[in-house]
Amino acid sequence: MAFDGLVIKGIIEELNKNIINSRVEKIYQPEPDEILIKLYGSTGKNNLKIVTSSNNYRIHRMMCQSFG
């Protein structure tokens, strides 16, 4: 699926709802084409994973759960 205007608009709306006013805790680069950003804010801790591979590009927001 291509990242057209509708997909990008949906991504922006979700990120604005869930990670607005969050702070960056840590940034990792586990692979040359992958970035993992750890965020914390009013909605709790989130991970934002961005993959820029030419054939498998994607962006994920993952909620972190604390145990204990």
Image: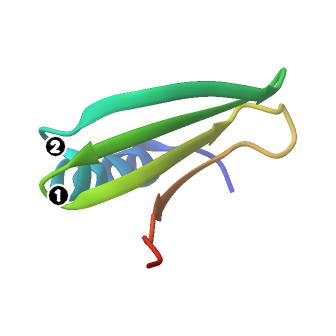
Looking at numbered disc 2 in the image, what kind of residue is underneath it? Answer: Ile
Instruction: Determine the secondary structure under disc 2.
Output: loop
Residue found 12% across the figure and 38% down from its top? 21
Q: Residue at x 25, y 60 (%)?
A: 44
Element type at mark 1: helix
Q: Which residue is mark 1?
A: 17
Q: Position of residue 8 (x, y in %)?
A: 41, 45
Badges 2 and 1: C-beta atoms under 8 Å apart? yes
Is the residue marked by circle 2 packed among few (<14), some (14-19), or many (20+) residues within 10 Å? few
The count of marks equals: 2
Residue 47's disc number? none
Query: How far is the residue under mark 2 from the one under mark 1?
Result: 6 Å
Outermost bottom residue: 68
The residue to which callout 2 is attached is 20
Up-down relation of residue 67 to residue 55 (above or below): below
Q: Amino acid at mark 1?
A: Lys
